[in-house]
Structures are given as C-alpha cells and as structure tokens.
Image (cartoon, rainbow, N blue to C red):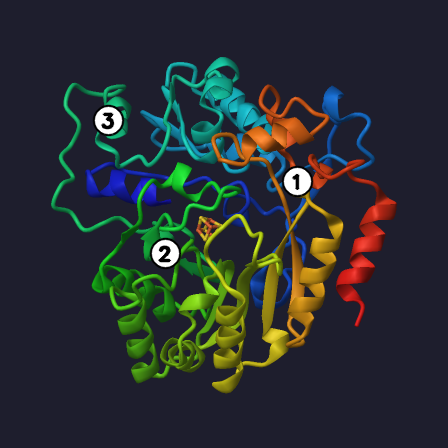
Amino acid sequence: MTCLQLFRQAGARTALLDCLDPMWSDTAWPRSQRCHTGSYPKVKVEKPGCLQSIPRQYSRYGLPYNAVSTALSGLKPPPDLVLITSIMTYWYPGVLAAIDLVRSTYPRVPIVLGGIYATLCFEHARQNSGADLIVQGPVEDEANWSRIWGLLQDTPPDISGKPSAGPALDLYPEPDYSIILGSRGCPFHCAYCASDLLNPGFSQRGFEEVRDGLFPEIGRGIRDFAFYDDALLVKPETWLRPLLEELNAVGLPVRLHTPNALHVRFLTPKICKLLHQGGLTTIRLGLETADFSERTDEKLSSREWDQGIRNLLAVGFRPEQIGAYILFGLPGQDQREVVQAISFAKRYRIRPHLAHYSPIPGSRLFAEAKRNSPYPLEEEPLFQNNSIWPCYKGGFTWQERTYWKKIVGAG
Ligand code: SF4
C-alpha cells in the first residue's frame, strides 16, 4: 500500500485489488473476531507433492479465484502496469497463480513482483514467477524506482521532497479497522528475524505525516487501529509520543493494538501511561525466551522484563490484555526452554503465545536451520512454512500440537 501511495505521489492513477478484502466481490465473509481480526474465506486445494507427508490441510485464503478474475478483467481503463506484492515466502504458489491470472488477462502489460517473498527468495522468484521484474527491498529505493518506471518510460518521476509515503488507506472503501505505520525496520538485528533484510536501517516518518494519515481514518468512523511498526517504541519522541498526546487531548474512542511485539525495555512509566490513555487495548510483547543468559538477541534482560510489566500493570492495563511471544521450534532448541518461558510469562498472569519459527533465507540463523531441518529449506520455500515446524525434532504432529496447547493453556 505504501508502494501505491508513492505511485500516486508520482501522478499515477491507481487501483488496489486486495484479495484478502471483500471490496471487489460479494463473496460471503466469515464473521471477524473481536476487534475485527480474521477470519478469511478459505478453500481446500491440492497439497503440493513435497508436502504430502505433512498431516495438515492445504488451503487458499481470500477471494475465490473467479472473483479475482472478474475484478481484474473489469478494470477500466486497463492497467499500464501491474504491481503484485508477496508476503510469506512459503505462500508463493498463490503469488504465481496471481501472476498467471494477470498475464492471461492482460498479456502485454508488464508485471512487477515485490514484497517479502520476492526480497527473501529473489532467485527462486526470478526462476519461477514469470514476472517481468522482481524488486528486492523497498520500492522507493532509487534503483528499484528507476527499474519499475523503466518498464513504462525513459525517466522516472521525481518524488524527492515529497512527504514520506504511508499506506494508501483511503483505497479501502469500508474498512472495519485500519493500520498505523510510523517507521520501517528495527535497530535490533535478531538472528531469527527478517526485519533488517526487508527494511535495512531504521527510519521514522514525521509526526504530522502519521497524524495526517490517521485522523481521516478516525473521521470516517474507524475505531480499531493496529500498529504495524517493528520497533514502535524506539525513539518515541519522533512521532509516537506526540501522536498519543494528541489522541489523548482530542479524547477519541479508539482502540489501539500492537500485533507486532513491543520492546519491553522501552516500556517506561511515561510511555505506558500515554499508551493507556491513548486507548491501547491489545498488547503483545517480545519475550522470546526466559533463558536470559543464553538468548541469541540483545533486546531484553530479566530486570527489564520485570520493570516493563510492572509499569504496564501500574497504569491500569490488565494481565489479560497482555500477551508474550515465545519462540518455538528454533533449530536445536531444548523444549525445556520453551516450558520455562511459558511459566515465566505466567508469573504475571499474562498469556504466552508460541511464535512458531519460520526459517528466513538470509537471516543469521538460516545456516543453522538448514543443518537442523530434514527439509531442503533453501531450494524449496514451501519448507519454510512454520505450520510444518520445519526445525522441530520430529516435525509437526497433532499429538505434539495438543501437548503444547495444553502447556500454554494450563495454569
Ligand atoms: S527486535 Fe523484533 S523486529 Fe527487531 S530484529 Fe528483533 S525480532 Fe526483529
């Protein structure tokens, strides 16, 4: 969506076809959960051959194929360029199907593929996707911007000096919720994470830019907002603190959510108070492990954890609003470490959430993941799927899943 905003800033007419949004069809949509999260329509599709031995269903989520095809062919005027994004590497079969569909609908229109799969599995995408151009990393990178526009004209439009682009939220006609994105990347460089591969460096937007994207969304009646930042609490003085102060001053009844983990060490009394007053409702924290002496990242100490949780509770957050992500299924991980982290999270009666490890090409842990997995992780992105527990000893079984569900839920 940020990409579309850049194109609009450059003077292009744009249309967004989000296959996980009902706006282009009258497809029946499952009822969403509390605060408008999930669910999506899904259809069971044939499992790829290499996943036959995995005891799980394989499904396609979102709009039915025919609805996408009808929406695509109904574009008036027809597009000059089609940009397709991609998310998880192991969802690439859906991306390839989308490219095929666009190609058969508009055979002469150039197709650009970007996003997470394209960035992390560039070579795989180059060999298999059929797109005319594969973009690695942010579209606004000068080289990417020139290459994309090179498919249409000799000189790319100059967007320097324009405000930094946020998501093009207004392209959703009737959203139940919206997002806030004030930064890209993360100054931490955890060995298991893709953040700095996708957005090298850490950059923040200005307070006014974030506010000017958010307030029209509130104005059209949206109440639930999810922060999509990887490092929301880093340098809060740039935009987060003034934004929360303004929200508090205006007194709007919004509910804020942090599905991406917050850095607990930055949960100072002041920021906790502002978050509470601003309407933060769902809080997710990055605990990852309780083995603080052996942790592979440097983002948290035991003392910081205790202090951060106490600060949250002191301003009035309830333990049931707070969840702690715990890494599960890391290469060579001792399962006792996971059990220990679950108990540790429960000491404050907050809910543990197992964050199933997905091996990320290019990350520092990927080499170890390859050594510990029975699957060819690099050659076939389908094996990077965290649903198959690719580095967990013995892989996914329903028995093991039930066992872990019990441990998480017990007590
Ligand atoms: S702190 Fe979180 S977002 Fe940042 S690199 Fe680590 S896991 Fe990724």
Relative to 157, 283 lies left or right: right
**Where residue 348 appears, x then y in whole percent?**
64, 77
Q: Quadrant of residue 245?
A: bottom left
Q: Amino acid at mark 2?
A: Leu
Eye-nearest disc, 3 or 1: 1
Residue 339 disc label: none
Give the mark nearest the N terminus, 2 or 3: 3
Would residue 3 appear left or right of 277 to someone viewing this image?
left
Tell me the crowding category of disc 1: few under 14, some 14 to 19, or many 20 or more residues within 10 angstroms, Cα based: some
Pick whichever, 16 or 1, lies toward us. Answer: 1
Give, as a three-letter code, the residue at label 1: Asn
Is the CB atom of the residue marked by disc 3 within 8 angstroms of ligand 1's nearest atom?
Answer: no
Q: Which residue is mark 1?
A: 386
- Tell me the kind of residue under disc 3: Ala
- As drawn, is 68 to the left or to the right of 266? right
As helix, strand or loop, the secondary structure at mark 2 comes to: loop
Where is mark 2, residue-wise? 181
Which of marks 2 and 1 precedes in the sequence? 2
> Are the residues flagged by discs 2 and 3 in contact, CB closer than 8 Å?
no
Identify the image quadrant of the C terminus. bottom right
Q: Is residue 196 visible?
A: yes
- Foreground disc of the pair 1, 2: 1
Q: Residues within 10 Å of mark 3 (few under 14, many from 20)?
A: few
Residue 225 appears in view: no
23 lies above or below 71: below
Q: Nearer the viewer, residue 409 or 61?
A: 409
